[in-house]
């Protein structure tokens, strides 16, 4: 599944973004500031602009969709040696963000993301490549929620996996956001 994640990232990112992602994987000291800069370069809604101070910029009615980015931001701000302990949660929040977007777009209430992607109405509206990219995140999301059978005293995901999943999620999210019914005006995110 991780291989599919890195393949999806390579497909979705420009050459400049791919180089920036490789730099983030290597830089272990001040990677949070570098990640914020990269996130800003991608644009749209991300961890670089989700908050205004300690408060989310979004309308409370958009909480299901945008709150996961606040958690991701908090996890990436942790002391570097502790981030490995929350990589599973970062990936979980990436999946939750995308699941909430799909539920919003198609008025699904209790359907999990993987099941939602098999619905005719979804395949009729989203192109096949976008669905395939979403399925990559679904696999990781499900592993983050349910799988704990990695070797003793190890982590299912590493920091590189979580950064790549977040950036890939952002690129997918940018494609979905025009189809999502948000209460927060899009101009709230401009110039942040």
Image: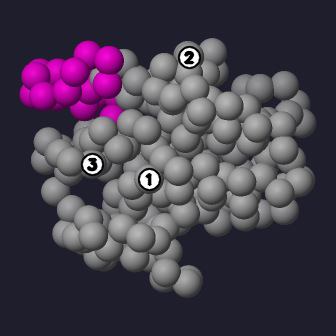
Mark 1 closeness class: few <14, some 14–19, many ≥20 residues within 10 Å: some
x 32%, y 49%: residue = 100
Q: Main secondary structure of the magenta part?
A: helix
Cα–Cα span, label 1 and label 3: 12 Å
Could one spot residue 186 in this view of the protein? yes
Magenta stretch bounds: 113-130
Q: Tag 2, which secondary structure?
A: helix
Q: Position of residue 130 (x, y in %)?
A: 31, 25
Instruction: Answer whether residue 23 is magenta in the image.
Output: no
Asked if the residue under mark 3 is in contact with the one under mark 2, i.e. CB atoms within 8 Å, the reply is no
Vertical side of 15 occupied by 186: above or below: below
Q: Position of residue 33 (x, y in %)?
A: 72, 60
Q: 15 or 80, which lies in front?
A: 15
x 37%, y 43%: residue = 173
Question: According to the image, label 3 marks what residue?
Answer: 177
Point out which mark residue 43 bears. Answer: 1
Question: According to the image, label 2 marks what residue?
Answer: 7
Q: Quadrant of residue 19?
A: top right
Q: 19 or 147, which lies in front?
A: 19
Mark 3 closeness class: few <14, some 14–19, many ≥20 residues within 10 Å: some
Q: Quadrant of residue 126?
A: top left
x 26%, y 26%: residue = 117
In the rendered view, does 188 fall on the left or right side of 126?
right
x 34%, y 57%: residue = 65
Q: Position of residue 172 (x, y in %)?
A: 39, 36
Image quarter hosting the N terminus = top right
């Amino acid at each position: 599944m991780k291989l599919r994640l890195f393949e999806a990232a390579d497909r979705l990112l420009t050459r400049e973004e791919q180089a920036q992602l490789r730099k983030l994987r290597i830089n272990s000291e001040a990677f949070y500031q570098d990640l914020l800069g990269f996130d800003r370069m991608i644009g749209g809604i991300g961890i670089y602009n989700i908050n205004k101070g300690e408060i989310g910029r979004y309308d409370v009615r958009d909480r299901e969709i945008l709150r996961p980015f606040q958690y991701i931001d908090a996890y990436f701000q942790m002391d570097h040696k502790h981030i490995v302990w929350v990589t599973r949660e970062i990936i979980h929040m990436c999946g939750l963000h995308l699941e909430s977007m799909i539920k919003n777009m198609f008025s699904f209430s209790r359907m999990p993301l993987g099941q939602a992607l098999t619905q005719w109405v979804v395949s009729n509206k989203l192109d096949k490549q976008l669905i395939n990219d979403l399925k990559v995140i679904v696999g990781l999301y499900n592993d983050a929620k349910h799988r704990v059978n990695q070797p003793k005293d190890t982590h299912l995901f590493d920091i590189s996996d979580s950064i790549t999943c977040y950036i890939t999620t952002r690129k997918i999210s940018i494609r979905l956001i025009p189809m999502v019914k948000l209460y927060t005006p899009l101009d709230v995110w401009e110039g942040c």
